[in-house]
Structure formats: C-alpha cells, structure tokens
Image (spheres, rainbow, N blue to C red):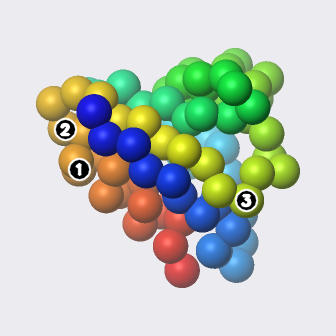
Amino acid sequence: MISRQIDTCRRRTPIPISFLIYTASTFDCDIYIRCDNKQVNVKNYEEMIRDLSARAKSLVFFFNGSDEMAAQQKIERIFSD
C-alpha cells in the first residue's frame, strides 16, 4: 500500500471529479482519499460527491493493489502544474 499527501491546489484550474473518477477507474488497484476522518473510494461517484470536502488544500490518497505505483504516479501528475 502506498499513501501520498497531494496538494490539490497546485493547478491553475480545478480537476473535474468525473475526470478523477475516470482516471482512477483505469487502474486495478483500490484508490481511496482520507477526508474528514472518512475513507472515500475515488472510483465511486456517490461517495466522491457526498463525502469529499472541496475545501481541503491537500488530500491523502491511498493506493493498494497490483498497479498501485502506476496509479499513484498518474494521480500525482494530474494535480501537478
């Protein structure tokens, strides 16, 4: 399992939740975000809408599975400049 704190405010434009969900869905590993003491499944639209706090400047992502390293690198690239 890999965990990374990612600054979600580094980009000039926000990332649409649908793009983040789509990107996460291309990987076989589980991807979660720790947000307000909840674990939010990045691949689940309802959880993302209901439980993800848009106020957070940085989020802790958890990657667990066979392609966790590739998923972690891709998600970090999405939020970089």
User: In x, y percent, where is residue 35?
Assistant: 68, 34
Provide the residue designation for mark 3.
Answer: 57
Mark before the other along the chain sequence, 3 or 2 = 3
Nearer to us of marks 3 and 2 is 3
> Does residue 25 appear anywhere in the picture?
no
Provide the residue designation for mark 2.
Answer: 67
Regarding mark 3 in the picture, which secondary structure is present there? loop
Q: Is residue 51 left or right of residue 59?
A: right
Q: Is residue 70 left or right of residue 34?
A: left
* Residue type at the position of mark 1: Ala
| 58 w.r.t. 47: above or below | below
Within 10 angstroms of label 1, few (less than 14), some, or many (20 or more) residues?
A: few
User: In x, y percent, where is residue 55?
Assistant: 84, 50
Residue that appears at 49% across and 42% down: 61
> Does residue 64 appear anywhere in the picture?
yes
* Pointer 2 with pointer 1, Cβ within 8 A: yes
User: In x, y percent, where is residue 81?
Assistant: 54, 80
Provide the residue designation for mark 1.
Answer: 70
Determine the residue located farthest toward the right in the rendered image. 55
* Pointer 3 with pointer 1, Cβ within 8 A: no
User: In x, y percent, where is residue 27?
Assistant: 29, 35
